[in-house]
Image (cartoon, rainbow, N blue to C red):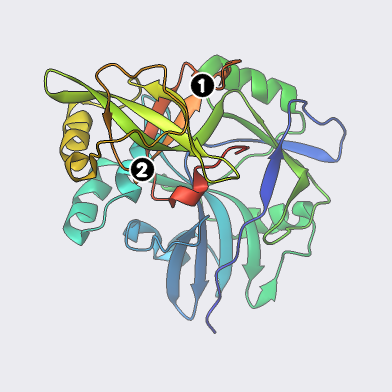
Amino acid sequence: MNLESIVPFEPIRSKVIPQGKEWIAQVKWDGVRMLVYYTDGEARLINRQGRDRTLQYPEFTEVPAYCKADSVILDGEMIALADGKPSFHEIMRRDSLRQEREIRFASGRIAAIYMVFDVVYYNGVWMNNRTLAERQQLLGQIIIPSERVQGVPSLPEGEPLLAVMKERSWEGIVCKRLDSTYAIGGKDARWQKIKLTHDLYAAVGGVTYRDGMVNAVLLGLYDEDGKFLYIGHAGSGKWKVQDWRDLTEHIRPLIIPVRPFHNVPERVKGAVWIQPALVLKVQFLEWTPGGTMRQPIIQGWVNVPLEACHVGQS
């Protein structure tokens, strides 16, 4: 039996932590959403966008080593740590690789950890109509914890967990109703995320240089009419010198003579325009009155289409 890939259940964004005994809270991991499909002795890893990532994470294809099931669909987050905290930049260094030799080399240097928080299918039976409480109980019975695979802990109250996330400068928390079923392809208030920062996918429409190397990117989003709008520039983040060198080489064939942005960027002097094709994940504090990001920080490259770079991302 071949298990077809599903669209995972998504939380909505909230500014208020829901209260009541029917709610639990979990860490919101700064990683890549990943579903593991296992049936007939074969495993596939599929991300939120439905893209196959089995090649990128070969150490997770031996599902019986970490899950007691004949067939299963697990839902969770693939993360990597840097300085003791989840790093989107680090996990994307794994996720973006395509060559088997590079992946084998990277798997020993960038340790991926699969944080499992749900089970959607188990031993021939769909679990999506069971309550979260039932699914969590099952998950606790079938997951075999290790350094590479962990079940995501749940806490009865969100405030203490969010306080810890603030102290550690982590991404935030997700609150879930214990009676919630798993809405495949759904997104509703039974799952709510409380984030300490904003993040979005943005396309690069220009760059600036220093000493012959790119030192900042000009970013944009598409509105409902298809206009490409400038939303700010970023030069800080988790990139190293080699990352900027790679970008300098990568954009050469994308350079164009005219500005791709519909509006005029605040940082025009010395800018070189490029055809929007490269997508970044960016974290920022808030929107300014002028419609630009305040204190944007580059998180890393992402393999998503330009359509993901739209105004109104949550």
Residue 267, disc: none
Total marks placed: 2
User: Which residue has dot 1 on it?
Assistant: 293
Residue 215 seen: yes
Question: Who is closer to the viewer here, 142 or 102?
Answer: 102
What is the residue that sits farthest to the bottom in this orientation? 1
What is the residue that sits farthest to the front in this orientation? 258
| Residue 236 horizontal side relative to residue 102, left or right | right
The image quadrant where one finds the C terminus is top right
Query: Is 28 rendered above or below residue 226?
Result: above
Q: Residues within 10 Å of mark 2 (few under 14, many from 20)?
A: many
Q: Residue at x 70, y 71 (%)?
A: 126
| Residue 114 horizontal side relative to residue 27, left or right | left
| Type of the residue with mark 2 | Pro
Q: Residue at x 17, y 57 (%)?
A: 101
Report helix, strand or loop for mark 1: strand
User: Distance of mark 2 from mark 1, alpha carbons?
Assistant: 19 Å
Query: Is 45 rendered above or below residue 253?
Result: below
Question: Who is closer to the viewer here, 189 or 65?
Answer: 189
| Type of the residue with mark 1 | Met
| Residue 54 horizontal side relative to residue 313, left or right | left
Report helix, strand or loop for mark 2: loop
Q: Residues within 10 Å of mark 1 (few under 14, many from 20)?
A: many
| Residue 302 x, y percent position in the rendering | 39, 44
Residue 276, disc: 2
Quarter of the image where one finds residue 60? bottom left
Q: Earlier in the sequence, mark 2 or mark 1?
A: 2
